[in-house]
Amino acid sequence: MTITLEQHIDPQLIPILEKVHDPEIPVLSIMDMGVVRSAKMLESIAQVKITPTYSGCPAMDVMGEDIIRAFKEANIKAEVSLVLTPAWTTDWITPRGRKALEEYGIAAPLEENADKEALLGNKKVVKCTNCGSHNTTLVSQFGSTACKALFQCEDCLEPFDYFKCLK
């Protein structure tokens, strides 16, 4: 089941928010990650609400600082707050974000059932980001960050991260 949440983002603020990147995955903007829940001007201050990708994510503090810095560069004061519910889901990653992940060498999240099969080692469904083969093996439940798993391609022998499905 795909969960969607209406975002309330002032269109004039989108270009500024698209300049802010996920510090752990620099090819993704916070807009592509789907962490921006709302952004609006209120009495000449940009009020931005973001949702963490998972509880305790260390990147959220950096994202908040980067958002404030991006607005400051545009001569706009900004305030950032965290919104914890509803919890972030990988369904909120945009199609452009999924493509950027793959091009960067991180396999995009699968659907929930396929993700479980892959992480339990039951099926070879995670596609190698280097050669496209599905002949891949889980090496570790945790990759470069807690939200990723480490896989290796059995055909080209390259290791790569897989962004776990979070629902």
Image (cartoon, rainbow, N blue to C red):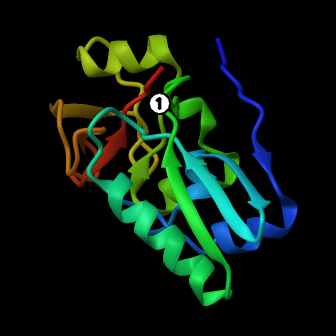
> Residue sitting at 77 percent across and 32 percent down?
6
> Residue sitting at 40 percent across and 33 percent down?
126
Quarter of the image for the N terminus: give it.
top right
Residue 15, placed above or below residue 91: below
Horizontal and vertical percent position of residue 160: 28, 51
The amino acid sitting under disc 1 is Leu
Horizontal and vertical percent position of residue 146: 22, 39
Q: Label 1: which residue?
A: 84
Horizontal and vertical percent position of residue 48: 62, 55
Which residue occupies the extreme right position in the image? 11
Question: How many marks on residues?
Answer: 1
> Residue sitting at 49 percent across and 25 percent down?
87
Q: Callout 1: helix, strand or loop? A: loop
Could you tell whether 140 is left or right of 164 in the image?
Answer: left
> Residue sitting at 23 percent across and 32 percent down?
137
Residue 111, placed above or below residue 52: above
Could you tell whether 12 is left or right of 44 in the image?
Answer: right
Residue 83 visible, this angle: yes
84, 22: nearer the viewer = 84
